[in-house]
Image: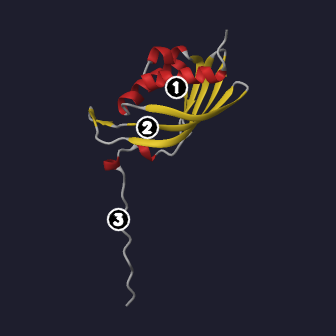
Amino acid sequence: MARSPLEVTGAFISAINARDLTALRSLMTDDHIFTDARGTKFMGADNMIENWVCFFNSYPQYWIRIDSSFTNGNRVALFGETGGKWRIDGRIQPGSWKISASWLAEVAHGKVRRWNIYCETEWSTPPMFRFIPPPKMAILEA
């Protein structure tokens, strides 16, 4: 019996949380399209596996937790949180990040064809590298 779109996306998230590249690849259509939170599109399942390798390396202990979802035909909307750590110069940094996020998936033939994430993106830069603007100075009138 074929899995429902919600079951497929659940398996996809489990593969992400386990950092299981073989399972991830088996759950993507060949023409898979990932759209990140900045609107950048990555096309092709094999290309996306290479991107997941880089992502898991840069953001170790990455995870997704879903609190609610709904389906409309072959599309699944998911709402929850995601988080992880940062790796800089080969070292996992202290601290971690966690944000609210939502995802939209399109399932075709039992595989994820499209995977979009919607969230703020400040988390991607470790705190020690974020630009902190100088304080505003009061202008004194003579």
Quadrant of the frame with the N terminus? top right
Quadrant of the frame with the C terminus? bottom left
User: Where does label 2 land, which residue?
Assistant: 83
Among the two numbered marks 3 and 2 on one chain, the one whose residue lies closer to the N terminus? 2
Task: Give the Cα distance between marks 2 and 1.
Answer: 13 Å
Among the two numbered marks 2 and 1 on one chain, the one whose residue lies closer to the N terminus? 1
Nearer to us: label 1 or label 3: 1
- Residue drawn at x 35%, y 65% as measured from the top left: 134
Please, is residue 22 above or below residue 90 in the view? above
Mark 2 burial class by Cα count in 10 Å: few <14, some 14-19, many 20+: some
User: Where does label 1 land, which residue?
Assistant: 13
- Closest to the observer: 84 or 50? 84
State yes or no: discs 3 and 2 in contact (Cβ < 8 Å).
no
Where disc 3 sits, the SS reads: loop
Please, is residue 125 above or below residue 28 in the view? below
Where disc 1 sits, the SS reads: helix
Q: Which amino acid, mark 1?
A: Ile
Which mark, by number, is residue 134?
A: 3
- Residue drawn at x 26%, y 35% as measured from the top left: 89
Task: Give the Cα distance between marks 1 and 3.
Answer: 41 Å
